[in-house]
Image: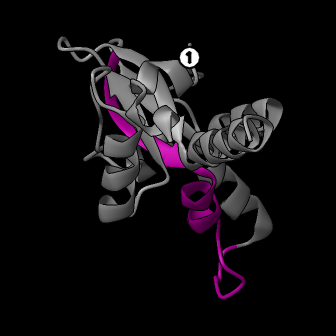
Amino acid sequence: MQAFNDSVTKWMTGPVITVPAEATIIDADQLMTEHGIRRLPVLENNRLVGIISRGDVREARASAATSLSMWELNYLIARLTVKKIMTKDVTTIMPSYTVADAADIMLNQKVSGLPVVDVSGNLLGILTESDIFRIIVEARREASTSV
């Protein structure tokens, strides 16, 4: 499949919807809901410093086993920032990587998305497992129409 030899820039999503590190997790959750996405790169001074996912937000919510009141919980959650729960050591890729390289990294690192950054660390896009699935489906369609 030729698509796997393509540069990730051909298939990545960009520009990327991001969230500032000081945003609340409520803000991040709202952004993900509004845009139908599952992860947000986190920026601080326009630099990638982390990534937050729907799962991170879900895990940050209080469990039923707490002794705090609903009002106390809501107050604390409303003040919890993305910076406190984000994944800080983000695996990234360069635009020169192929889709096959990216898929291999995602599989080995057990991550579902890879921010694409240039040599200066500027965020250019993001390649996700959904993009990989789209590549497979499109390659399959092309193969079936060329027979």
- Return the residue nearer the eye: 97 or 4: 4
Q: For the point 45% across and 39% down, which residue is it? A: 4
Q: For the point 60% across and 22% down, which residue is it? A: 17
- x, y (%) of residue 146? 73, 35
- x, y (%) of residue 58? 64, 62
- Return the residue nearer the eye: 101 or 58: 101
- x, y (%) of residue 139? 64, 40
Q: Residues within 10 Å of mark 1 (few under 14, many from 20)?
A: some
Q: Left or right: 123 with respect to 24?
A: left
Name the image quarter holding residue 27: top right
Q: Which portion, as a residue range, is magenta?
A: 47-68
Position of 117 relative to 60 (above/below): above
Position of 58 relative to 41 (above/below): below
- x, y (%) of residue 137? 71, 46
Residue 143 visible in the displayed image = yes
Pointer 1 residue = 14
- Return the residue nearer the eye: 140 or 14: 140
Name the image quarter holding residue 67: bottom right
Position of 38 relative to 42 (above/below): below
Instruction: Identify the amino acid type marked 1.
Output: Gly
Q: For the point 56% across and 13% down, which residue is it? A: 15
Residue 22 visible in the displayed image = no
